[in-house]
Amino acid sequence: MSTDEGAPEDLLLSEQACFALYSASRAVTDVYRPLLAELGLTYPQYLVLLILWESEPRTVRDVGAALALDYGTVSPLLKRLEGTGFVERRRDPRDERTVTVHLTDAGRALRGRVAHVPTTIGCALGLDDEARRELITLLRTLTASTIAFRGADAESSAG
């Protein structure tokens, strides 16, 4: 195996924030997978349920916006959740173009069955509550910064 000893340190894989985020995301999702599989859920389905447990009904558009997913991704996800009997989609009688998502009784009852998941994930992260909150704040800042950067980059490219 050869290495280019003249390679700048910032081009090392171990120095890439993107790879550290990617690795962390995969590791955390891998902890979720068996916990949710016991309940017949995937990780994206769990995220949809979290949104609905916060408040419902929600429009399909709201669900997509909360998860930063487009309609083409959210719609099949909701269809599968509807097939499990946890949610129901309904057309808004005031505006037939708008579809709202509602929890079923089974979807509401599932909330109690997943109550252990955040604690288990907290243990897996190895962070106390303060460090976990700091991590969430840092990740939200990173997300907002990259979105702003992409927007500014798109504006400078267009001009």
Image (cartoon, rainbow, N blue to C red):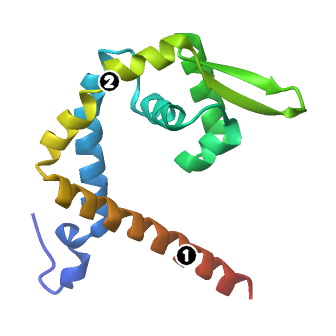
Q: Which residue is mark 1?
A: 148
Of 4 and 56, which appears nearest the observer? Answer: 56
Q: Nearer the viewer, residue 125 or 30?
A: 125
| Residue occupying image coordinates x 58% and y 12% | 83
Residue lying at 19% horizontally and 43% vertically, measured from the top left: 122
Q: Position of residue 138 (x, y in %)?
A: 32, 67
Q: Residue at x 65, y 77 (%)?
A: 154
Image quadrant where one finds the N terminus: bottom left
Asked if residue 39 lies left or right of residue 49, the reply is left
Residue 115 in picture, x, y percent from top left = 29, 27
Could you tell whether 135 is left or right of 110 in the image? Answer: left
Identify the image quadrant of residue 133: bottom left
Between discs 1 and 2, the one toward the N terminus: 2
Give the label on residue 115, or none.
Answer: none
The amino acid marked with disc number 2 is: Val
**Callout 1: helix, strand or loop?**
helix
Q: Nearer the viewer, mark 1 or mark 2?
A: 2
Q: Is residue 106 above or below residue 4?
A: above
- Residue 40 vertical position relative to residue 71 in the rendered view, above or below: above
Q: From the image, which quarter does the C terminus lie in? A: bottom right
Callout 1 crowding tier (Cα within 10 Å): few <14, some 14–19, many ≥20: few
Q: Tell me the tag on residue 114.
A: 2
Instruction: Name the residue type under label 1.
Output: Ala
Residue occupying the point 57% across, 15% down: 104
User: Is disc 2 placed on a helix, strand or loop?
Assistant: loop
Q: Are marks 1 and 2 in contact (CB under 8 Å)?
A: no
Q: Residues within 10 Å of mark 2 (few under 14, many from 20)?
A: some
- Which of 7 and 114 lies nearest the eye of the viewer? 114
* Percent of width and height locating residue 14: 17, 67
Residue 20 % position (x, y): 24, 61
Kindly indicate the quadrant of the structure image that contains residue 16.
bottom left
